[in-house]
């Protein structure tokens, strides 16, 4: 009888030892199946690490994870049969829903992430001469004019010809002075805002302007909204004519050479200045012409 009980005990132990790994494997498989991966990339398709990814159901946060070195944020125990909205560092990701068990890829602009991670307001000034060379040694001063005039900060431009002010208080108005001269430019931003502006001064410079700059585009249309080709478009910086071009079949004239970041140019079409119309890097300006103003 004792031998039978012993055999039964041994058999049970052997059976359990065989089943236990199966149960463990099954549990691991179920856990893996319940995992959801959200991969974060930038505009170049590169993985973005160490950013916070949050998932929301009807505005209520249900999960949060940090992206790893491969841009992957791993989530477990998400609610079943629910489409979740995603945010990366607080930035809404439109038209991209996350569902339990289905891996997703979300895209976020590098500039947006940089702005979100930046505290206060950032202002960067590029100091050039008329030869588009960087000028050092100029004193750039920010004056807080929100309530009363307060000299807030002054920096001397280094060899790069670039000066940066960080952690400026939001919702304050700052006037920009260079060597004591008001530049007629005012900064006012919210938390995370980043402003860039090019200023032209007199002085000996070095190097050449090489800041990444997007084209300035002017589109010319008639009273009916139809694009006009072969219209002469000129851009002026003050009294200085910067560039000239003619509109293409789609009514656009695009400018990139000698265009600088943060500079607003007066727009002339067919030798006439267009009031309250300004061209700038990365922006599109539309100009309407009356029939008598159209170049035939």
Image (tube, rainbow, N blue to C red):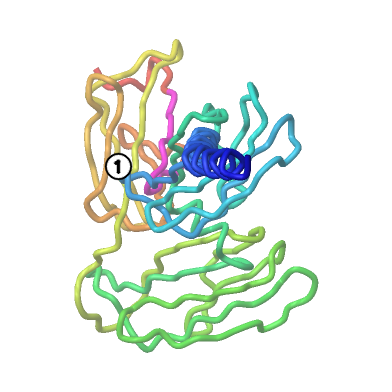
Give 164 or 68, whichever is nearer the viewer.
68
Residue 140 percent coordinates (x, y): 49, 81
The answer to whether residue 76 is above or below residue 82 is below
Q: Report which quarter residue 119 is drawn in.
A: bottom right
- Residue 199 drawn in magenta: no
For residue 92, say whether it is visible: no
- Horizontal side of residue 4 vs 239, given as left or right: right
For residue 267, say whether it is visible: yes
Near mark 1 (Cα within 10 A), the count class, few <14, some 14-19 or many ≥20, is many
Q: Which residues are magenta?
A: 278-288
Name which residue lies at 43% across and 18% down: 290
Q: Report which quarter residue 77 is drawn in.
A: top right
Name which residue lies at 63% across and 39% down: 1
Residue 274 percent coordinates (x, y): 44, 37
Residue 296 percent coordinates (x, y): 24, 17
Count of numbered circles on the image? 1
Q: Residue farthest to the front?
A: 1
**Mark 1: secondary structure:** strand
The answer to whether residue 163 is above or below residue 220 is below
Give 206 or 130, whichever is nearer the viewer.
206
Q: Residue farthest to the top?
A: 224
Residue 270 percent coordinates (x, y): 30, 32
Name which residue lies at 52% across and 56% down: 51
Q: Label 1: which residue?
A: 234
- Residue 285 drawn in magenta: yes
Question: What type of secondary structure mainly makes up the magenta span?
Answer: strand
- Horizontal side of residue 258 vs 120, given as left or right: left
């Amino acid at each position: 009888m004792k031998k039978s009980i012993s055999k039964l005990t041994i058999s049970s132990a052997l059976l359990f030892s065989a089943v236990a790994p199966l149960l463990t494997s099954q549990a691991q498989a179920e856990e893996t199946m319940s995992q959801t991966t959200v991969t974060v990339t930038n505009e170049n398709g590169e993985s973005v690490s160490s950013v916070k990814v949050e998932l929301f159901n009807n505005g209520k946060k249900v999960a949060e994870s940090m992206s790893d070195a491969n841009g992957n944020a791993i989530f477990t125990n998400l609610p079943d049969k629910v489409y979740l909205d995603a945010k990366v560092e607080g930035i809404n990701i439109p038209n991209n829903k996350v569902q339990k068990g289905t891996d997703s890829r979300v895209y976020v602009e590098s500039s947006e992430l940089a702005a979100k991670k930046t505290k206060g307001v950032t202002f960067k000034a590029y100091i050039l001469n008329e030869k588009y060379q960087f000028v050092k040694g100029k004193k750039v001063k920010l004056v807080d004019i929100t309530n009363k005039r307060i000299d807030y900060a002054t920096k001397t431009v280094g060899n790069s010809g670039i000066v940066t002010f960080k952690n400026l208080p939001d919702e304050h108005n700052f006037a920009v002075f260079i060597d004591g001269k008001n530049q007629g430019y005012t900064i006012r931003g919210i938390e995370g805002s980043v402003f860039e502006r090019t200023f032209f001064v007199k002085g000996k410079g070095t190097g050449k302007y090489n800041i990444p700059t997007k084209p300035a585009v002017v589109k010319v249309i008639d009273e009916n909204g139809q694009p006009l080709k072969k219209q002469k478009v000129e851009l002026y910086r003050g009294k200085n004519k910067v560039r000239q071009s003619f509109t293409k079949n789609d009514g656009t004239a695009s400018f990139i050479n000698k265009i600088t970041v943060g500079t607003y140019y007066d727009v002339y079409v067919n030798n006439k200045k267009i009031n309250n119309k300004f061209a700038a890097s990365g922006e599109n300006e539309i100009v309407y012409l009356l029939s008598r103003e159209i170049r035939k």
